[in-house]
Each structure stands twice: as C-alpha cells, then as structure tokens.
Image (cartoon, rainbow, N blue to C red):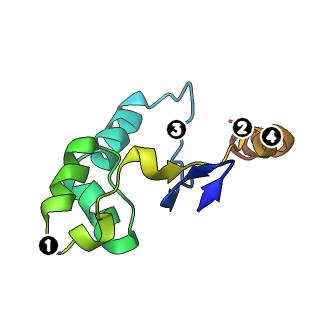
C-alpha cells in the first residue's frame, strides 16, 4: 500500500490492555504485566490470534520457527504503517474515559 508517497507492506492497528492508575492492589497489576509479557503468553497470542510479539527477541525467534515463520515473514518496523489516531481519539476519548470512570468508580 502507498500512503503519502511511502510504501508499506503492513498496517498496524492498536490493541491495548489497560491498567487503572492508583489501584489498591498493585501486586496484581505487576503480576498481570509479568504474565502478559512472558514468552509463553506472547507465543500463545501469536499462535491463536496472529498477534506479533511485542518483544523483539520473541519476534526474531518466531521468524525461525517453521510453524510461525509464514505468519511473521520478514516483518520489520520500516514496513509498518500505523494510522494517526490522535484526531480520532481526541474526539472520542473523553466520553470513553468518563464512562470508564463512572463504571469503575469506587
């Protein structure tokens, strides 16, 4: 795909897993991060859903795995187009934050 004269092989989309600031259970937040970022979890997400690992060491490892290499190919960040979501988020973020805060207040 070509956008503004630049060629890209992939489109990057965001998927976020969020933690609430100020939790009274920070140990659970740290445990979540540890689990989500470990090799087994990232490998499972890649195998089950096609997510590329966020860790570069695991991305390189996946490129060498015969079962995963077709999914990863010769992927590199220079071939990735990530849309600028700032304008979109600036329109919709406030209502989302308000809804989140109302839902999880106390």
Residue in the foreground of this view, choosing between 97 and 102? 97
Left or right: 54 as drawn, with respect to 105: left
Q: Residue 87: which disc?
A: 4
At horizontal 52% and vertical 29% (from top left) the residue drawn is 23
Q: Are marks 2 and 3 in contact (CB under 8 Å)?
A: no
Alpha carbon distance from label 3 to label 1: 35 Å
The spot of residue 15 in percent (x, y) is: 54, 53
At horizontal 66% and vertical 53% (from top left) the residue drawn is 3
At horizontal 86% and vertical 42% (from top left) the residue drawn is 91
Q: Nearer the viewer, mark 2 or mark 4?
A: 4
Q: Secondary structure at mark 4?
A: helix
Q: Secondary structure at mark 1?
A: loop
Alpha carbon distance from label 2 to label 4: 27 Å
Q: Which residue is mark 3?
A: 19
Q: Residue 49: which disc?
A: none
Left or right: 60 as drawn, with respect to 48: left
Left or right: 23 as drawn, with respect to 60: right
Mark 4 or mark 1, earlier in chain: 1
Q: Dot 1, crowdedness within 10 Å: few (<14), some or many (≥20)?
A: few
Query: Where is the N terminus found, in terms of image quarters?
Result: bottom right
Alpha carbon distance from label 3 to label 4: 23 Å
Q: Residue 66: which disc?
A: 1
Mark 3 or mark 4, earlier in chain: 3
Left or right: 65 as drawn, with respect to 97: left
Q: Dot 3, crowdedness within 10 Å: few (<14), some or many (≥20)?
A: few
Q: Residue 105: which disc?
A: 2
Query: Where is the C terminus found, in terms of image quarters?
Result: top right
At horizontal 71% and vertical 37% (from top left) the residue drawn is 105
Q: Residue furthest front?
A: 5
The spot of residue 16 in percent (x, y) is: 54, 48
Mark 2 or mark 4, earlier in chain: 4
């Amino acid at each position: 795909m070509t956008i503004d004269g630049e060629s890209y092989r992939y489109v990057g989309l965001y998927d976020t897993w969020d933690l609430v600031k100020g939790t009274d259970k920070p140990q659970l937040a740290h445990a979540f991060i540890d689990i989500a970022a470990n090799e087994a979890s990232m490998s499972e997400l890649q195998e089950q859903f096609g997510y590329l690992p966020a860790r570069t060491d695991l991305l390189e490892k996946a490129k060498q795995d015969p079962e995963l290499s077709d999914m990863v190919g010769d992927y590199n960040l220079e071939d990735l187009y990530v849309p600028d979501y700032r304008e979109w988020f600036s329109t919709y973020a406030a209502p989302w934050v308000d809804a989140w805060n109302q839902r999880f207040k106390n």
